Image (cartoon, rainbow, N blue to C red):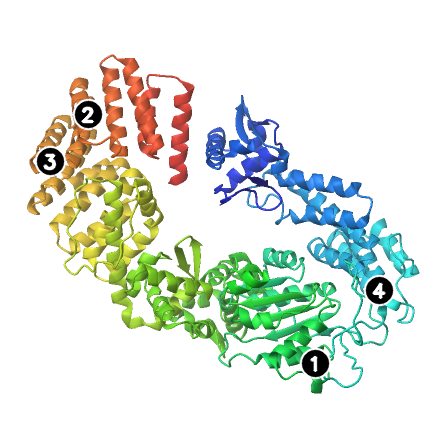
Amino acid sequence: MEFRLLGTVSVETLTGPLPLGPAKRRSLLAALLLSANTPVSLGRLTECLWDDEPPSQARGVIQGHVSRLRALLAGADAEAYGVELATLGDAYVLRAPETLLDSQRFEELLMLAREQRGPADAVLMFKEALSLWQGPALSGAFAGPPLRVAAHSLEESRLATVEQLSRAYGALGEHHRAAALLTAETAAHPLRESLAAELMLALFRAGRQSEALDRFHRTRRLLADELGIDPGHELADAYALILRGAPGPTGAAPPKSAEASPAAGPSPAAVPSGAEGPSRVTGSGTDAAAPAPPRPPFPAAPPSPAGEPHPIDLLPRAPRGFHGRAAELAALSRSAAGEAPVCLVTGPAGVGKTALALQWAHRNPALFPDGRLFADLRGFSAAGEPALIDVLREFLLALGVSPRRVPESVPAAAALFRSLTARRRLLVVLDNARDSATVRTLLPGGADCVTLVTSRHRLEGLIASDAARPVPLDTLETDDGTALLAGVLGEERVLAEPVAARRLSELCGGLPLALRVTAARLAGRPRWTLAALAGELADERGRLAYLDVDDTGVAAALRLTVQHLPPGAVHQLARLGHHPGGHYDPYAAAALAGTDPVTARAALEQLAAAHLVTETAPGRWVLHDLVRLYARSLDPASAREALIGVLDHCIATALAAADTAEPGGEPCFVLPEDFRRPSAVQDFADRAEAMRWLATEREDLALTALAAREAGLDDRAWRIILLQWPQMVWRVRDSWSPLLELALESARAEKDAYAESRVLTLLGWVLTEEGRTAEAAALLERSPVLAREAGDPLGEATALVNLAVVQAELGELPIALENCARAVELTREEGDRHTEMLTLQHLARMHLTAHRPQEALDCARTALDLGPEHEEAARRSLLLAVCGEARLALGDEEDGVRLLDRAAQEAERDGYDEGAVRALEALLRVSARTEFRRRHDEALRRLAEES
């Protein structure tokens, strides 16, 4: 187990990070970890979790987060690591060994580094300490004032460590490494004078005096423009030292000419076999004639002697209007810090992989004093990929090989390339790679070389064989997308229509290519408003056409990706476009494509490898909106067939989920006459898994039902909605009425009395629980009549029970008792124990309301005898509560409290918060125990969080 504050606040375990949940829970954890093994008061925690006036229920919210955090730690076997989250009066303390906390290990490594006698050992310690950082401190948490102060303090410590590491590099003569390290940090902290001063000295000692002086003037102008101040003594002293040519305390003065520095002499490079004479291969200011002795472990590239060519640079120009991507740029810098690293930027077409790679490459020239190579491998181009020998020839010529001495075979040319790069510090950018084998052939040979690869595929083979470090690229956030538009159109035009600009960013799905095409359309039409174009893009039917300009566009980019896919994957993609929901599992994908889940999963994996779908959770994929529109255009004729397939998949799976969640319940309906049974239906191991599926798929099931209604498939629409009844019972106050009203429309459109009665019964009950009693009564009056017309006695019994509940609330208790008693008779005539249990539960509640506690107790006991103890969690809790309240009414307080507590515990154990609240409310009417109040408040809070 490991606690992390240096980056995203997290708890890492052997099985992965714990699901901490909302930002405020991470804030709570951060506050406790920052004072590990020391009690933190409730007041201090409140300051950490809220920026302004905390809500009145702040204590309850904190208690809820502590409870959930304690449960997560217990589930991760925290006790075995010596970790405990304890309550001490009005405070909490997180007890944990300091070795489990990354911030504590960071401080320990700093202390060890300062105790080292030699700079080489100090460098290792400082680098180890900085490797613990995974991003800005306390990321992912809601930072109240105390946490902001703590994050700033941690960042100050990190920056001080960077400066100490740069000085240690300087003590070793590794000034280029110091400059590379400091360049990245000064870009992120341009106003930090100590960083700028250290960078100036490192550049100067590396023989780059002009860059050092330029850095001073840039910083001076920035300080004047941003803060209105002059440089401080650190910057001024560094500037004076450089002007005097003094070396400073950590190195010698740079050579004034090539002759003054033996290090600037020839460096070796291999010569092709069979070459005539002592061939000299030049490039980046180096010659080659003979093998070189081994280099020291921290080589410093010499400054280029006067008159020699500048380092080779094949990079295209830096992208214009680049915005955002700070996290990905930082990830690339971290990935490039190892030995001979291969950095792999992956993502879908149009997401900006090449722009990111070039932006990073142009930002970090100091890292590569021997030059930068670039090749577009055109892995997804209609023009086809270039021959490998052509790419290698271009690289070798850039490195100074004579054209007539470039080998003719790929293996020989690749070997020469590796040899020439073995002792260089070089960047190789391989853009648009389609497969791992192509990349392997073009990898340089030097331990100090960095290879940066971009691809629409995940290239997992390259990760396995060459330890490539993936940097996945996702779409832009709305603010970054808006900034990109402003970069092309000008800030005035975007600021004039900020809402429309954000809408355009959303309609483009955060895809940089789509945003640039949109900006290009607007830039060429200065009289167009952003709102007008947003209105046109809002129409899905023409959106892809609007996002094409000349030979550039989203559809064209996607087309090039799709043409490299196998037929099965293309077929699956085309069918996915017709899914009305947002997510897919292999069962839904198989139903759409008319295949089986194994085939569908394989196709989804192929699509994910090409970044056309994204796996958001194990076995659950999603399509980008623009990819969905493109996929829909691949096979428009199959739309209805695909829709029916997924509708029937939803019905079959929801039936299986309902049967597992509420075993023994009678089926809600017969299947449609033309029902297409899927090739396979998901199995649910237990009630919890079935309920989890219903909860996870709720939004997609609603979208699917709406699509069925719009397509005239009403016989499917009401069934898909009604089959979610176990979740509706479990979370009755969770805004189900709009969905049930859609089901009612579908049932009436079908003129199906059975369906209408069933929907009215459920909708009436939901409205009753929402407090809309009069509306519920109006609907439920008709439900039993419709059930009798349809020949549905069990439906009539359920309708009578729900009607009785409303009648009791309206003060019509005698008629309510009659209807409940009639419902019990109907269920017994049908021999349905499950529905009889339901009717007896409500009859018991009616007797309790009518002040007949003994009759209520008898009914509840009879109902409990009908169902096995391990089933009917919600109903058992409600029946036990009735028993408890009846015992209280009969004067047996001890047994009443015991039964109500048992009812609450069973509801809490099974996650039935509605039942827990009801039982605990009854307990609080007769007991003032703090424990009951705490559990009641926690259950209420859980209900509020889930609503």
Q: CA distance from mark 3 to mark 2?
A: 16 Å
Disc number lying in front (4 or 1): 1
Q: Which mark is residue 397?
A: 1
For the residue labelled by badge 3, is the local secondary structure a helix, a strand or a loop?
A: helix
Q: CA distance from mark 2 to mark 1?
A: 90 Å
Whichever of labels 2 and 1 marks the residue nearer the N terminus, that label is: 1
Give the residue number, with chain letter if any, for mark 4.
207
Give the residue number, with chain letter if any, for mark 3.
827
Whichever of labels 4 and 1 marks the residue nearer the N terminus, that label is: 4
Whichever of labels 4 and 3 marks the residue nearer the N terminus, that label is: 4
The residue depicted at 33 percent of the width and 16 percent of the height is: 926
For the residue labelled by badge 4, is the local secondary structure a helix, a strand or a loop?
A: loop
Q: Residues within 10 Å of mark 4 (few under 14, many from 20)?
A: many
Q: Which mark is residue 212?
A: none
Q: CA distance from mark 4 to mark 2?
A: 90 Å
Residue 573 x/y as whole percent:
37, 67
Give the residue number, with chain letter if any, for mark 2.
860
Residue 340 x/y as whole percent:
66, 62
Q: CA distance from mark 4 to mark 1?
A: 27 Å
For the residue labelled by badge 2, is the local secondary structure a helix, a strand or a loop?
A: helix
Above or below 318: residue 778: above
State the residue in front, 736 or 344. Answer: 344
